[in-house]
Amino acid sequence: MKRNKWIVFLILCIWFGISFVTNILGPIMPDIISTYHLSLTLASFLPFSFFLAYGIMSVPAGLLVEKIGPKATMLIAFGSTFGGTFLFALFPVYEIALTSLFIIGMGMAMLQVIINPLMRVAGGEENFAFNSVLAQLIFGAASFISPFVYTGLINGFNSTDQKTSFLLGIMNSITSESVRWSGLYWIFGFIFLLFFLIIIFLKIPKFELAEGEKTGSFKSYIYLLNNGAWVYFFGIMAYVGTEQGLANWMSQFLYTYHNVDPVKSGAAIVGLFWGLMSIGCLLGLLILRLIDSRKVLIGACVLATVSLLLGLLGPTSVALIAFPASGFCLSVMFSIVFSLALNSEKLYHGSYSGILCSGIFGGALVPFIIGVIGDLVNLRVAMFFLLLPLAYLVYIGMTANPLINNKTISLKSLVKRN
């Protein structure tokens, strides 16, 4: 198939949009709790609703792409995300937020299933690894930027300056004063509507799914689960749960125990968390060329544990550094666990990927558990729960026995080459 750089550019923009919306819950969590007077448990139902949709839709989305094709599936996905964001923008109440986030999550799950094989086809298999890393960086950049957009929006609403922008004036007129932060969802809705309209008029190439991208039969799932796939399924749950547990509760923790303003500083700290995660991905590419991935996974977990403990137990000045630094430590974990899983099995990689992607449900479960424990005891004690998924990831690093190890080169040979 002829390479299409515009499709690649569109996919990168979609990755930006996915990340921009997905990871905004953490920065706005203190505002959500304050607006609706929620307990930590009720607040945790919001990320639970979003990531529950991922767990439910990952495998069906693959079947949908095979049955009706990428373009139709993308239109359904963007229609879902637009509908979810617009619903909440119009009716910014807690119950609607739960429904809205579930609908948005379903659309996001469908998009992630589509755009990886589409990237491979449109950009060329020879460029797929590079484009995938680029997409990961774009994803991190959007997560870094979105908290600052939130801060800018709230500051704009609160400004006494009469010379507000035309766009901000419109936002001000359609957003209720009691839920100013919900104006973000008008922005999200516009983004998804724009994508929907582009897809309608754009020719999306049909593609043949590679063997590793096909959903597979029910028999293949049974085979994989009987041969240890559940170990790595829980590994993905552990990673995503740790990532989202930190991202969703970090700002609230800093506000509760260190009186850090969620808008002025809390959002920036969450943005830095995602920014350092992107930098960690780049450095991780180099480290994985030098060290076995299992050792890298164990080392990253140890560093993440130290960073977490410093954030939970240290003074304000330490917590403001330690929490975002944990993002740097987490950066390589997802790709390592995913590759260890696929490299441990010769058969049914498409089905295996579906099982692993369903593990994204950890992003629903762990923040919810933290919320429940936080109400029963307190948020600081609750966030110690994150030590358990980190310990499980260490277990994977110690026990994994892949058929194929990641290729490494010694520092000595690297120096000789230069």
Image (tube, helix red, strand yellow):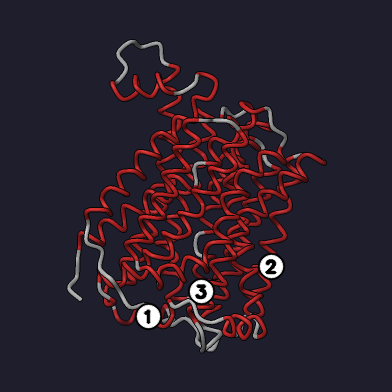
Q: Earlier in the sequence, mark 1 or mark 2?
A: 1
Residue 74 placement (x, y as % from top left): 36, 58
Is mark 1 in CB contact (under 8 Å) with mark 2? no
Q: Which residue is mark 1?
A: 210
Give whichever of discs 2 and 3 has the lower sequence position: 3
The alpha-carbon separation of the residues under discs 2 and 3 comes to 20 Å
Instruction: State which quadrant residue 203 falls in.
Output: bottom left
Return the x and y of residue 347 as percentages of the image width and height: 51, 88
Q: Would you say the residues marked 1 and 3 are in contact, meaning their CB atoms lie under 8 Å apart?
A: no
Q: Residues within 10 Å of mark 2 (few under 14, many from 20)?
A: some
Q: Is residue 357 left or right of residue 377?
A: left
Q: CA distance from mark 1 to mark 3?
A: 12 Å
Q: Look at label 2 and name its amino acid.
A: Tyr
Position of the C terminus, as image quadrant, is: bottom left
| x, y percent for residue 284 | 45, 65
Q: Position of residue 185 (x, y in %)?
A: 45, 36
Q: Which residue is mark 3?
A: 353
From the viewer's perspective, is residue 256 above or below residue 364?
above
Residue type pointed to by label 3: Ser
Image vertical order of residue 60 relative to residue 349, above or below: above
Residue at 66% over, 39% down: 43
For mark 2, give the secondary structure. helix
- The residue sitting at 71% across, 38% down in the picture is 40
Mark 1: give few (<14), some (14-19) or many (20+) Cα within 10 Å.
few
Q: Secondary structure at mark 3?
A: helix
How busy is the neighbourhood of tag 3: few (under 14 within 10 Å), some, or many (20 plus)?
Answer: many
Q: Nearer the viewer, mark 2 or mark 3?
A: 3
> Which residue lies under the disc numbered 2?
392
As displayed, is residue 264 above or below residue 117? above
Cα distance in 3D space between marks 1 and 2: 31 Å
| Quadrant, the N terminus | bottom left
